[in-house]
Image: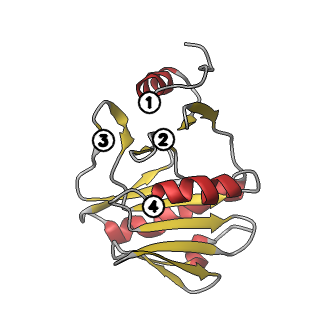
Amino acid sequence: MSQTLPAPVDYLAFARFERETESRHELEDGRVVAMSGGTPAHARLPMNLAAALHPQLGSGPCAVFSGDLRVYVEATANSYYPDLTVVCGEVALHPHDDHALVNPAVLVEVLSPSSAMRDRGRKGPEYRTLPSLQDLLFVAQDRRHVEHWQRVEVGWRVVELTAGTLVLACGAEVALDALYAGVA
């Protein structure tokens, strides 16, 4: 299959395309968007977070997944690759795409200068439409800063952290020292 698809692309055509191509893409409003590589900090932050979460979640009902797992947002029919995902309970996939998760409990986006506006302004509001989502983290890679969106009874609360500990609804806690370990 060609490396590009003319817009607009419906979701099932995108899912077929994504299975047949070697590179990763996201689907946004019928457009296929190529994913770019990241910096060492961008690559290390989700690994540090996964390393801190995995022992706490262990064999319990929640599990950590790498940035290779695509998330489908039903409200918009868009599909994204967050940098890290936590699922609590059974993994639920799109009914016609066994590569797309529909029930994340935690999503993490590491912000880069080229992606910060899109991650916060576009993906963030879409992610928050997911009924299963409890925590949404925007992690800065150029400074010690985490924007933590927490689902509350009526909407969302935002907590900004530059020190201390992240406390997630799944019961895990992560010190920012551990998250930013080895990141200049």
Q: Which dot, 3 or 4, sits closer to the camera? A: 4
105 or 128: which is nearer to us? 128
Q: Is residue 14 above or below residue 86?
A: above
Identify residue type, mark 4. Arg
Mark 1 Cα shell of 10 Å, populated few (<14), some (14-19), many (≥20): many
Describe the element under mark 3 as helix, strand or loop: strand
Q: Which mark is residue 79?
A: 2
Describe the element under mark 4 as helix, strand or loop: loop
Q: Give the residue drawn at x 47%, y 64%.
A: 51
Q: Give the residue drawn at x 48%, y 41%.
A: 79
Q: Are dots 2 and 1 in contact, CB under 8 Å?
A: yes
Q: Earlier in the sequence, mark 4 or mark 1?
A: 1
State left or right for residue 103 relative to residue 9. left
Mark-to-mark CA distance, 3 and 1: 14 Å
Mark-to-mark CA distance, 4 and 1: 20 Å
Which residue in the protein does label 4 denote?
128
Identify residue type, mark 3. Leu
State left or right for residue 65 relative to residue 80. left
Q: Tell me if residue 78 can be seen.
A: yes
Tell me, what colour scheme is on the image? secondary structure
Which residue in the protein does label 3 denote?
93
Q: Give the residue drawn at x 24%, y 58%.
A: 89
Q: Quadrant of the C terminus?
A: bottom right
85 or 73: which is nearer to us? 73
State left or right for residue 61 relative to residue 147. left
Mark 2 Cα shell of 10 Å, populated few (<14), some (14-19), many (≥20): many
